[in-house]
Image: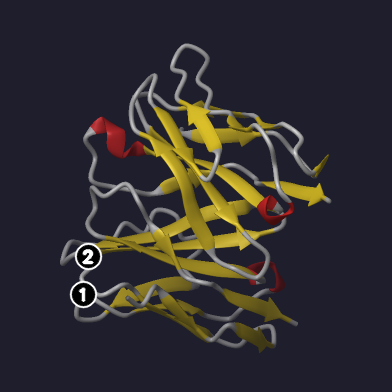
Amino acid sequence: GAGVSQSPSNKVTEKGKDVELRCDPISGHTALYWYRQSLGQGLEFLIYFQGNSAPDKSGLPSDRFSAERTGGSVSTLTIQRTQQEDSAVYLCASSLDGTSYEQYFGPGTRLTVT
Amino acid sequence: GDSVTQMEGPVTLSEEAFLTINCTYTATGYPSLFWYVQYPGEGLQLLLKATKADDKGSNKGFEATYRKETTSFHLEKGSVQVSDSAVYFCALSDQGRGSTLGRLYFGRGTQLTVWP
């Protein structure tokens, strides 16, 4: 079946602009995670959604970052007023539920802030 | 807090050589441990996992044993192939302590290059 998909695959934006990154999890997976992969910081957890529960936003680096998940499926990560340090690959993962051990990762969105 | 430390790369080996990538962790409970692999141009894939002490995870000739006494989860393969060239990430999840939060804590990654 289809895996986790993310769009766009690449995004170049100017400093100060807002960007939206999209994640389509595997159908039926109730848990969804966003991570960021950057040269300086490695792989960092950003936010976690599980079903209809309030998301765990503890990994978001600043209030410029927000995310939502509509209808328990598609998720959008929004970065407002982008900065150069936001340049990274943003990875989305889903798992069957919050207690499943395996997370399935999407191919990522490479964000470059110029 | 929870964290993972893994051996820095890059690691360069000849085909059929023995591979070890060291990984140690810090956690207050009994986390689940994972190795993920990222092949060139592809997304992260789960390679193997172990959910309790002394468990051995294995896949594609790779093995790792969950050692509570040394807080380690070293990745090994007896004979690497060119196709094993990739970045390998050690990770832990705090689900093992009964939490439903499955966030992963990753090591920095180790680039492996295998030459024919």
Q: Nearer the viewer, residue A1 or A15?
A: A1
The chain containing the residue under callout 1 comes to: A
| Quarter-of-image position of residue A82 | bottom right
- For residue A34, side relative to residue A30 (left or right): right
Location of mark 2 (residue): A30
Secondary structure beneath dot 2 equals: loop
Location of mark 1 (residue): A72
- Residue A4 in sight: yes
Q: Is residue B49 above or below residue B82?
A: above
For label 1, count other residues whose C-alpha is less than 10 Å away and answer few (under 14), some (14-19) or many (20+): some
Q: Amino acid at mark 1?
A: Gly
- State whether discs 1 and 2 lie on one chain: yes
Mark 1 near mark 2, Cβ–Cβ under 8 Å? yes
Secondary structure beneath dot 1 equals: loop
Query: What x and y, as percent, mark residue A17?
Result: 60, 88
Query: What x and y, as percent, mark residue B37?
Result: 57, 52
- Residue B12 in sight: no
Q: Is residue A103 above or below residue A15?
A: above
